[in-house]
Image (tube, rainbow, N blue to C red):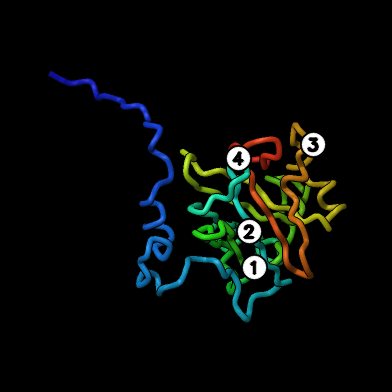
Amino acid sequence: MALSPKIYQELPSQTAGPYVHIGCTPQMAGLETIYGGGHLGSKMVNDKTLGIRISISGKIFDGTGTPIKDGIIELWQADAQGLFNSPAENRGKSDLNFKGWGRQPTDILTGEFHFDTIKPGRIPYLSSNKLQAPFISIWVAARGINLGLHTRMYFPEEVEANTEDPVLNHLEHQNRINTLLAKPVTNGNYQFDIVLQGENETVFFDI
């Protein structure tokens, strides 16, 4: 007799837990010999990478305003020409000295993350001729999150490009665009904090 499979519901505890760090950021779990002993992807550039060097620092805050000290954050972006380091890129040759991806755990003591990268070029919006403003895609995993959250970081000095950006123009709550804008700290250094809940919650994308 055939038995009907039991579909179990997800438990509240089944969120990003310790095994995520062991697999994705082993150094944070005390495994210093894996992946050459360095965190994966916190430095996204080398000496030959084209483009304007920038650094991005920030924290992930929960709904109470407390920094999350066991989160993981990933960056995905185009190179300085607006091209991706991907086999699917058919618009030209991307910069082989820029991988376009980075991963970093939040610091276990301070909750801060830090990336060294470049300012991305503009890319087309879907299959249209419209260009998006320079942006960096961000993925966040942390305790209490069942599925990773997707957001973007834009550059406040790109006023005209941001005004034209079709994604920003499509946002229902235009007064929340400021949650997607990085804060310049010094020349080439930006701060971008991510708020998971509350009045100043960062805009997240359903993708």
The kind of residue tagged 1 is Thr
Vertical arrangement, residue 121 with respect to residue 17, above or below: below
Q: Residue at the left extreme?
A: 1
Indicate the quadrant where residue 30 lies: bottom left
Q: Which residue is mark 2?
A: 77
Residue at the image point whose x is 31% and y is 27% from the top: 8
Mark 4 lies on a secondary structure that is loop
Q: Which residue is mark 1?
A: 117
| Amino acid type of the residue tagged 3 in the rendering | Gln
- Closer to viewer: mark 4 or mark 1: 4
Element on which disc 2 rests? loop
Instruction: Tell me, for residue 174, which label it has, or none.
Output: 3
> Circles 1 and 2: CB distance less than 8 Å?
yes
Question: Around disc 2, counting alpha carbons within 10 Å, would you say few (fewer than 14), some (14 to 19), or many (20 or more)?
Answer: many
Tell me the residue that label 4 is attached to.
Answer: 64
> In the displayed image of the protein, which residue is found farthest to the bottom?
47
Rounded to the nearest whole Å, what is the CA distance between mark 2 and mark 3?
24 Å
Name which residue type carries label 4: Thr
